[in-house]
Amino acid sequence: MTRMWPPGGDTRRPLAPRVAAPREPVDPARIDRRVVRRRAKGMDAGAVAAALEDARFDARQASRHEDLADDVRGRAELAEWERIDQLLAAALAGTVYDPDTDDIVQAELAADAAAASARDAELCEAMRIAARADELQALRELGTLEQTEPRDGGEAVRDELTRRAGGYVQADVDGWLAHALAAHLGHYRDPTAREEAAGLLTQPVLAHAALLAELARLIPGADVGELAFAARLATTEPETADALAAFLTRAEGTQA
């Protein structure tokens, strides 16, 4: 079987640990604001004013102690009582506080929901990348990586495999991607995907792909022995490989 990129050799790697779900950052000030809102629910302006005075008293007491002077949670609690006090002062007489009708609270809840959705999407994408990386590792061990076409997100999978390898360049994966990019295989059939790859893949991979594309036009059906130098040149001197690819493009245009 003719191969268009360097064989991978012994590329077995242990499977990566399962992807951990991203957690919502802990915000002590936000926790205290929520506590205040729960306490204030159903209170009228007078009850809130009394609670505000208690919070101010606590703040004055805390300011006398050096270890409590920069208490973020205390300041957040006081500020929230002040905000709710002002909210009821501007409302009709007899209005009681209800977080469900508090625009600030509802905006925070909407932002929380959007952030949770983003975290879920991030987790799903990380799981997809990890699963595809597991699949490619298995194909490498079977020696059939070159028979597989890349999919959307393959650049992130390459980064994951490199991370698993401790930062070492995966020559067989890079060669596989370069060949697919040069031959427009898999999702690289889409010109937009090829344009995006230019900002996601490393310069050696892109230089290798550019050189392979020009060589394929000049010498269709070239075997691995004739093209092995392209990977070596792109890896060690990517700028030279780019220059050679550009030169071959110019030469081909001149002959035409």
Image (cartoon, helix red, strand yellow):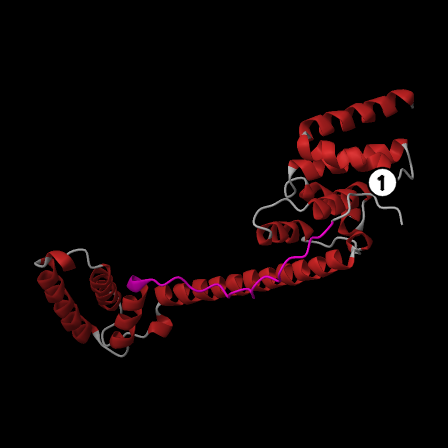
Give coordinates of residue 119: x percent, y percent.
51, 62
Decide: is 121 above or below 149: below
**How many marks on residues?**
1
Camera-nearest residue between 24 and 154: 154
Q: Quadrant of residue 108?
A: bottom left
Residue at 37% x, 74% y is 100
Q: Is residue 96 visible?
A: no
Q: Residue furthest bottom?
A: 42
- The answer to whether residue 13 is magenta is yes
Q: Quadrant of residue 243?
A: top right
Horizontally, residue 156 falls left or right of residue 44, namely right
Horizontally, residue 221 falls left or right of residue 184, namely right
Give coordinates of residue 18: x percent, y percent.
56, 66
Residue at 27% x, 67% y is 32
Q: Quadrant of residue 225?
A: top right
Q: Considering the image in quadrants, where does the C terminus appear?
A: top right
User: Main structural element of the magenta stretch: helix, strand or loop?
Assistant: loop
Decide: is 234 above or below 72: above
Decide: is 67 above or below 238: below
Secondary structure of the residue carrying tag 1 is helix
- For the record, the magenta segment spans 9-29
Q: Which residue is mark 1?
A: 224
Camera-nearest residue between 26 and 227: 227
